[in-house]
Image: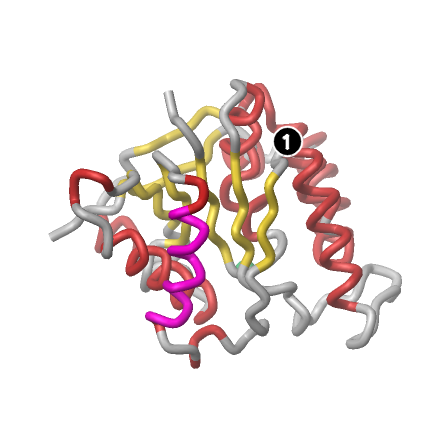
Amino acid sequence: MERHVLVVFPHPDDESFAAGGTISLYTQAGIPVTYACGTLGQMGRNMGKQVFANRETMPEIRKKELQDACRVMGIQDLRLLGFHDKMLEFEDVDFVADRIEEVIRDVNPSLVITFYPEHGVHPDHNAFGRAAVRAVSRMPEEERPVIYAVAITKNRTEVLGEPDVVIDIGDVFETKLAALAAHRSQTEAMMEETKVKVQNKDAQTLQWLQFEKFYTYKWN
Ligand SMILES: [Zn+2]
């Protein structure tokens, strides 16, 4: 049983894609979840299926979408760390880690969910995963929360092996879909395709809606 779960991702929607089901299972079990979201995704290329956002309105729209998604997943504590989208890779890792460490000190999590450094595909994902690991690494080993790291690189199994944490989200996959749909500016077109794929029982889509997979981060 977790004491408190801290989710650390750089972009609004990362949490829903990577861990929307897992987060929902924790909140439904009464475990508090805090989401430390690095940026507002203000450089996102998607502006909606029928374009309804522009560069000026984007941050506010994505913030509102993120708040909606958090409500769907039962996240009651959302921390916006205020970094700039697509710039995280240029920030000093310790500077970013300082901000994450503040949240860790505040909520004292037993579990941190973030991107696996070097396996996040996007430079922001890698940079934020690195900073989260750095923040945890500063703690004495016996006090560190467990880290569930999300790897999405094509060569992940070659390098890391099979993920050791496989969470069955079958009971909450509709909540995950609703959280994804809340990020409307980014996901609207994709959600329509997903609905069709679910209706057609597309094997890959059904698999995606059945399991979320993580690697327990190993210190060495
Ligand atoms: Zn992202």
Q: How many marks?
A: 1
Q: Residue at x 42, y 55 (%)?
A: 102
For the residue pair 191 and 21, the one nearer the viewer reads as: 21
Q: Find residue 107 and report its horizontal and vertical position in percent.
A: 44, 40
Relative height, residue 108 to residue 96 (above, below):
above
Q: Callout 1, which amino acid?
A: Gly
- Among all residues in the image, which is located at the extreme bottom? 90
Q: Name the main secondary structure of what is drawn in magenta.
A: helix
Q: Find residue 91 and report its horizontal and vertical position in percent.
A: 43, 78
- Asked if residue 104 is among those painted magenta in the image, a careful observer would answer yes
For the residue pair 212 and 126, the one nearer the viewer reads as: 126
- Asked if residue 90 is among those painted magenta in the image, a careful observer would answer no
Q: Find residue 147 and report its horizontal and vertical position in percent.
A: 32, 43
When asked about the image quadrant of residue 203, the answer is top right
Relative height, residue 48 to residue 32 (above, below):
below
Q: Residue at x 67, y 44 (%)?
A: 180
Read off the residue under disc 1.
74
Q: Residue at x 71, y 52 (%)?
A: 187
Q: Find residue 49 and report its horizontal and vertical position in percent.
A: 82, 59
Q: Which portion, as a residue range, is magenta?
A: 94-105
Relative height, residue 27 to residue 91 (above, below):
above
Relative height, residue 79 to residue 32 (above, below):
below
